[in-house]
Amino acid sequence: MGGEGEGRLFETRVRRGRTWYKLYAASVCGGVCLTWVYRATNIPEIGEKGRWAWMGMLVAELCFGFYWVLTQSFRWCPIYHRTFKERLSQKYGNELPPVDIFVCTADPTIEPPVLVMNTVLSVMAYDYPPEKLSIYVSDDGASELTFYALLEATDFVRHWISFCKRFNVEPRSPAAYFSSPEQHDLRYASELDRIKEMYYAMENRIKVATDFGRVASSVNKQHKGFSEWNSQITPGNHQAIVQILIDGRDQNAIDIEGNTLPTLVYLSREKRPRYPHNFKAGALNALIRVSSEISNSPVILNVDCDMYSNGSESVKNAMCFFLDEESGQQIGYVQFPQNFNNLDKNNIYGDYISIVNEVEMPGLGDSIYLGTGCFHRRESLCGCKYSEHRRMLRDMCNQVKMRKPEESTSFLEERAKDLASCTYEQNTNWGKDIGIKYGCLVEDVVTGLSIQMNGWRSIYYNPSRKGFLGISPTTLSQLLVQHKRWSEGLFQTFLSKYCPFLYGYGKIELRLQMSYATYMLWAPMSLPTLYYVIIPSLCLLKGIPLYPRISSSWFPVFVYVIIGTQAYSLGEALWCQQSFRSWWNMQRMRLMRRTCSYFFSLLDTTMQSLGLGKSSFDITAKIADHEALERLKKGVMEFGSSSPMFSVLAAIAMLNLLCLVASVIMAVVREGFKDQMALQFLLCGMLVMLNLPIYHGMFLRKDRGRLPTFLALESCLIAALACLLSLY
Ligand SMILES: O=c1ccn([C@@H]2O[C@H](COP(=O)(O)OP(=O)(O)O[C@H]3O[C@H](CO)[C@@H](O)[C@H](O)[C@H]3O)[C@@H](O)[C@H]2O)c(=O)[nH]1
Ligand SMILES: [Mn+2]
């Protein structure tokens, strides 16, 4: 898309070394085909032992093979973008288009107001003309504590913005900056102390209120906005609340150096029990409408409340794409990667975001919309088709917020409330053709896909300084629940009219269709995985061979496929600056996600298609208790609660342990080691190794994060029963 040339604001490069990769991929592909041939030609005769098990293996391996082909879409032709910010300032100076920034929050207990406020402060301090920034906070929790935190921020930000700009500090979330190891410059030590003190005093006031559960009555009088809260308000039942906390058009809204401040708006859309609120998608759509009334900027950035801005140049970077004269017109959105600042160094929860960011996403050509850290052109989000666009973005560069005489702040607020009412969307196309799509747990992915279908291109941009940092789950059950929600949403999308192969056919590249499908098929891939972690082990116990013997000429084929794919994935992890241990943990978590999250989401999807049950958006917690954090630091997995998912995990772990131990005993006591069992033995052994933290959590640990005792008993029982049943 981007290219050489003086005037270009960005360039696009293709990664080198692809020929080697293609040779490798072709050889693995050949290997996989050969394993299929072996399976198909060696099925035991009718009446022979293991005929069914064998056929199941064939089906599972066919699934794995096809899935592997899908994953090649990422690796075939990865591209990278680079922006030229100097040229942007040469060309446009401060004449840049205005930007609306949306921050979503939904629950003051699991998303603490201080966290939300830090995210808001970080985006208010962007290195961008402040009069062109408007920040909108959507609070689905309708919490006066969140409102209070923002109110506090309106004062602090006057100092913070000028501090950031004078000393060019990064990152610009105060909490993150004060705790970052980045060397603070001694030249401004006294200023730093002063602003730190101011921040912590404010943080303390907010925390006191948060602990108390509501704001003090003295604070209550400080702002008219508090009058919206009365004892009847609950998150699910309240009127629309819109408060313009800072009006950028107001002459008095200035920082301590006299520069204009960005606009800041608090919004809590109306909610009533009888009206579906459509979770985050509904919140974003209300934001789109409310912002169109107040600032109506042509570019929109949306972030989750935990995703603070870590790089103050992100807006300018995004503009390099939108304002590029050759291809900028067609770009519908620019997605920055998700990154996390709370990953432990051993990576016990096998976070693979680095692989996604460095390897998979660059391979798409375009980008998937990931729900946070994404800049949209307003038109693309509002359902306009690419060819229909009229105004060029660069013509909007001079658009500044002008106060029309009749538009007082309270007048705007009243108008905005109508747009945020729960009846507004009735009999409209909101959630269908306009705005974020409804009815899907991964509203972001579907919305991105439909923007691409409307003819817009998209950019995945991964700068070396990470643009955004958020919080990833810190307990195993949080993580599994989050993945369940994703895989459920993704699979439902695959089954819906948005299936990339049908919906996207002829409209987006095959490679992109395949990449979408790779994620959307997580849920059904749980079945072959479950088969593979149960049946070969049971067959090992029973003495039914499922793989070629060591002396067979098929043996090297299997070994090549196994070692080839594993070594490659290790190489990829190392290339992404992960350690061996981190890679090993990723393998474990991949297994757990597949056998638990994906399996449960498959079950739920099936139930729903039978008309039983309904999916819900379980918000990911952004806090953890102190003890649990200590364990995380030590690299110990947190089980804690007893979720049904853990029963499956534990049962599979016990089953493999039993099969391994029993087969070792039998080999020693009875017939000696059979060489046709070698690969099965290896597989079972590997599974036991991967499951070590589960045995540890069941039998050895005493802390509160261990697996509950009854779960240990239950899993032993199930595993023993399965073994006995398979023997007879
Ligand atoms: O009714 C709701 C539910 C959630 N949210 C907000 O949505 C964001 C994402 O929720 P979170 O529970 O943190 O989701 P994640 O597990 O982090 O979700 C990832 O996946 C989602 C799609 O499932 C995307 O929308 C998110 O941007 C992406 O970070 C948060 O800011 C929430 O406050 C709302 O505003 N209203
Ligand atoms: Mn999140």
Image (spheres, grey):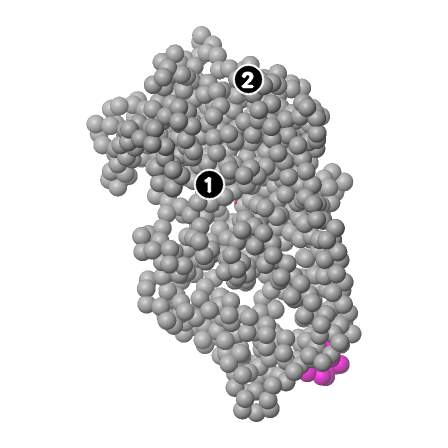
Q: Residues within 10 Å of mark 1 (few under 14, many from 20)?
A: many
Quadrant assignment for the N terminus: top right
Q: Residue at x 62, y 21 (%)?
A: 393
Residue 48 is inside the magenta segment = yes
Q: Amino acid at mark 1?
A: Leu
Q: Quadrant of residue 441?
A: top right
Q: Nearer the viewer, mark 2 or mark 1?
A: 2
Which residue is disc 2 drawn over?
A: 93
Q: Residue at x 57, y 26 (%)?
A: 85
Asked if residue 526 lies left or right of residue 169, the reply is right
Dominant secondary structure of the residues highlighted in magenta in the image:
loop
Using the image as rendered, state which of residue 197 and residue 454 is in the foreground.
197
The image shows residue 368 at horizontal and vertical percentages of 61, 41
Task: Please tell me which of labels 2 and 1 falls first in the chain.
Answer: 2
Quadrant assignment for the C terminus: bottom right
SS for callout 1: strand
SS for callout 2: loop
Q: Amino acid at mark 2?
A: Gly
Q: Residue at x 46, y 41 (%)?
A: 469
> How much space separates mark 2 and mark 1, taking CA atoms?
28 Å
Using the image as rendered, state which of residue 315 and residue 438 is in the foreground.
315
The image shows residue 234 at horizontal and vertical percentages of 35, 38
Q: Residue at x 55, y 17 (%)?
A: 93
Span colored in magenta: 43-49
Q: Is the residue 330 above or below the residue 552 in the image? A: above
Q: Is mark 2 within 8 Å of ligand 1?
A: no
Q: Quadrant of residue 374?
A: top right
Residue 13 is inside the magenta segment = no
Which residue is disc 1 drawn over?
A: 469
Q: Is mark 1 within 8 Å of ligand 2?
A: no
